[in-house]
Image (cartoon, rainbow, N blue to C red):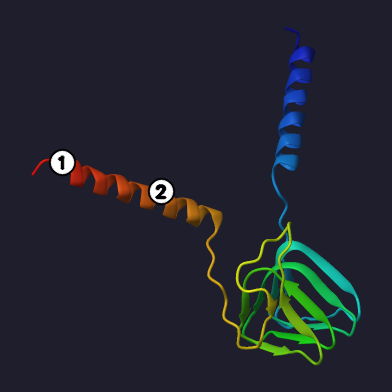
Amino acid sequence: MAVSDWRAKAIKRSALAVAGFAFGTAAHADWVIAAGSVSDMGGGTVTLGCTDLYVAGTLTVGAGGSLTDVRSVFIEPGGSLQLDGGRLELAQQWVNQGSLSTGGGQVLRVDSATCPAAGPLGPIGMDAVGVPTLSEAALAWLAAMLGWLGLRSRRRSSSPR
């Protein structure tokens, strides 16, 4: 095999590997409002594509504005979310350790095909408690542990005494 043939095949394999990695994995980009920063959406709309919103600074959503397709919202201590007539639609966790000002706006838990809900649907009050969820890795670990305990229990009950 000539060196140029070998290089061409190596480049082709590398390109296929990169393409497989790029298109075979899901992108994930949370929106983080860092401590000390101020973001004012006015009446604009932002769709987060089932990713999380972290507010450690100040985020203002003006009248007619909306944040949609949000998976979970975390308002950190010292963070401030101001819905001055705006709307926030989330699907799962709502953790408020900072401050929320609704000012005629609303926070709703909604369900969609791209971002399934966890918890009761509808308006979320300022005193709402987060719904506990597990990551995929934690859920797989829990399933493995329960399976192992089940097998261990079965072996003990079937062995003669």
Q: Which residue is mark 1?
A: 159
Quickly name the residue at label 2: 144
Q: Which type of secondary structure does the marked residue at label 2 adopt?
A: helix
Q: Residue furthest left?
A: 161
Above/below status of 87 relative to 103? above
- Circle 1: is it few (<14), some (14-19), or many (20+) Cα within 10 Å? few
Give residue 75's position: percent from left, percent from top. 66, 80
Q: Amino acid at mark 1?
A: Ser
Split into 4 quadrants, where in the image is the C terminus?
top left
Quarter of the image for the N terminus: give it: top right
Residue 90 point in image, percent of width and height = 71, 71
| Above/below status of 39 relative to 13 | below
Relative horizontal placement of residue 102, taking residue 153 as reference (left or right): right
For badge 2, the amino acid type reads Ala
Q: Residue at x 84, y 69 (%)?
A: 46
Closest to the observer: 161 or 61? 161
